[in-house]
Image: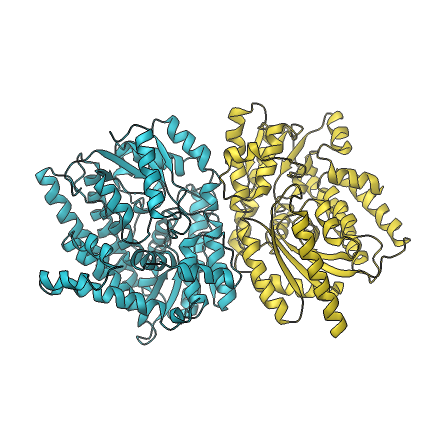
Amino acid sequence: MREALREAAVVINNSFVRSWKAGGKQIVGYTCSYVPDEIFHAAGILPYRIRGFGAEETTIGDTYFGPFICSLPKCMLQLIGQGDFDFLDGAVITPGCDSMRRLDDCWRKAGEDYPGIVPGFFFHFGVPHKCTDYTVKWFAEEIRRLIDAVEHYFSLRITEEGLKASIRVYNRGRALLEELEELRIMSEPPFSGTDELAVILAGSAVPRDEYNEMLQEFIEESRSRAGIDGKRRLMLVGSANDDVELIRLIEGDKALVVADNLCFGSRFHLDLVSEEGDPVIALAKRYLSKNECPRMYGQYRARLDILKENIQRAGVEGVILQNIRFCDLHGAENGLFERDLEATGIPCMRIEREYGPLVETGRMKMRIDAFLERIEQRKETA
Amino acid sequence: MRQATREYSFDWMLWATFHAASKLKKGTEKEYRSVLNYIPYFRGIVENVLKLGEPGELFVKMCERYLDNLVHVHERGRKNAITTFCFSPTIFYAMDITPVCMEVMTAFMTLTYKRGTAEFLDYCNEVGFTETSCSSQRGSLGAYLAGVGTDIDMIITDTPGVCDTNANAFSFAAAYLNKPFFQLDMPPVLTGERSNEYHRADYRALISFLEEQTGKKLDIDRLREVLAEYEKQDELINELEDLYRLVPNPLPVPFSLFLYASRFLFAGMKECTELLESMLRSGRENAERGISGLSGGSEKLRAFFCYIDHYTQNLHLWEMLDSLGICYAGNILSRYWAPDAPYVKEFQMQEAAYTIDTATVDTMIDSLALINSRMPMVKSIRGPYDAPNMWLEDTLSLAKMYRVDFIVYNGTPGCRNTWGMLKPFARDTEKAGFPTYIMYADAFDDRVQSWEATRERFEEFLSVRGLLG
């Protein structure tokens, strides 16, 4: 089971995707956690979170994106241009951030030079930057616009009952991920942060019903496993990371990542969707009220409170605040987190990195080791 | 930051500079010439502006007035709001709030001080704000974060959905300084009832926020007065836009800067109107005589800047264009999408324009919401660049209308929203027949690329493309 989850986490066109396509079914890719998977699930389409994992160069990405742009969408475009995402029947781009929203423009323009890379269904999905009554109303309309477009393009019908059933399936997955989270924060967790990320990543690339079963098995199996002890307990915060190797690098043989506030991480499964009332309104409320991402401006204090709560809950000894270069949303907020968390006695390390192959392994490892030494010394002098 | 920099209030220092500049022409020419020797780092801008006569003097006076309002805001019993260039200040004036436009403050110092805002730019990084963020906000933000500016009462932006680095600067400032924050959010599509309704609802929430912060209700009569003045300014700008279309263009190169600066500083206020009227008088005189606004008198090329200008010391950009005989058809900042604007009428873009209706308080608020949603950058950088009413369509239609010979992009490396698609954008403008030059400089920080290198590369482009002899 662990192997199946790991494969789904580190292989773009994984065996689940291949099997899904072999069954003649469709897959729609999306770029941001503000896109409700439930819509596609209800349509019998596999929602697939597009990633940049595995890109070994950015020659294609650099042709369309400018030089001052985050390397994550560049790596995504690289893979898209190379044909790694040819299995997608559709794509949904959101204004998660400026770099990511421009994937819309660059992908379509790259399609003029690389025929066949733009899927037939291509949708720009707006997401407001705050949660109020009128933004929820607008977002619900946007969800309906997406539903209409999916129904029209794929010639199918998404019923209210179907949507409610999908919400239940995803809520079950979220509840299971919460159980996983409970195991992760134990004093001797039965799996590493590397394993945990692999399990979460798999959830973005595996049919949800199958994933829920695998997740349940993983949790049950984990309950009987011996815990890991004697490691420094870290929290990872900041820009998106879909690379398990980054967590492996951080953990090494001295640390465990026991908590995070990452897009491909615990943020992905927080909060259930209400199963009562109009499902579209319920989806709009749940997805828009997620203020864990700094794209939701003016919510810093709320995010700081979440971090503090999780730090306490997971017994975190140090926080790594990382951002991909040119990711100003996370980079700037990391500066605030560092100021406010250090003031409460929580050691923090800020680091800027590039997305993609771990070309900076030596530099990062050295800084992480120094940070772990700092935590160690702090413990000794406490 | 040097201790010496901390010794002076940032905005007081700027006010004192412009206050002195506004008096320079009050003496004799001999006295003026003598004073220039004592301001070696400021004389470049002073000379370039004041040589334009009355419009130049009014421009300096307008800047001085804006800074005067800011420096004395609290002793005059008012509140201030940090805001952004693409947020129309009309509502602030209608509610007796003093706006502090972050980018304009940065530009003031960049234009007038030898090292520009370098120390404030770096100070932002020292306290945790990213060095990759846009210099247009960082330049003055650093001063307020360091506590060397006027105390700020509230922070307001309208760029979520348009520009992350802009919105993030304001969001960061609010968290760092622990100040009340409000954002106007922009949906990706400009037109249609759904977007209009969203803009209106959001704007009403803004007014509630402002009423809460000031403890005062919106004064309807005052609002009507300000909007009437705004409409009057629209008419003046429309006529100036028509003058831009003439060959030769009778307007001096810096007039574009004057035009958008006046709207950023005093939209809906007499200070802006007075300057626009003076510019128009000067432009009409040149037009009647059939002469170019260029100081050399001969128009060799016509240029359109599809984004912003380059603000480093002494109006270098404007001086360069003028000396090369390049008539300047303005940039994205000087277009507001008034219903009778020449570019609206020429291309039947009425749906993209706002309307002003002063009949009731509701129609006035709706008008303000639409005005704001059509502000530079907010209007056309929100959706995919090649979507209707967005950047490519605007750029090509303006370039055609002003019969320009080439298009120039200049911004800052912090501009994620344009650098994210600038290459395909430029490919499209080239395909449409406009040689397009992408400047890799930073509009507000010439440590990124010196002005000398910027100019050399600009001239190299003109030469390589065979545009200038």
* Observer able to see residue B70: no
* Observer able to see residue B12: yes
Residue placed furthest toward the bottom: B75
Q: Residue at x 64, y 52 (%)?
A: A286
Indicate the chain coloured cyan by its letter.
Answer: B
| A117 in relation to B341, above or below | above
Give percent across and percent down for residue A324.
59, 49
Which corner quadrant holds the N terminus of chain B? bottom left
Please state if B245 lies on the left or on the right of B203 as rendered: left
| A27 in relation to B49, above or below | above
Q: Residue at x 21, y 55 (%)?
A: B273
Give percent across and percent down for residue B255.
22, 48
Indicate the chain coloured yellow by its letter.
Answer: A
Q: In this orientation, which residue lies closer to the viewer: B2 or A110?
A: B2
Q: In this orientation, which residue lies closer to the viewer: A247 or B76?
A: A247
Give percent across and percent down for residue A171.
73, 49
Q: Residue at x 79, y 41 (%)?
A: A5
Please state if A261 lies on the left or on the right of B415 as rendered: right
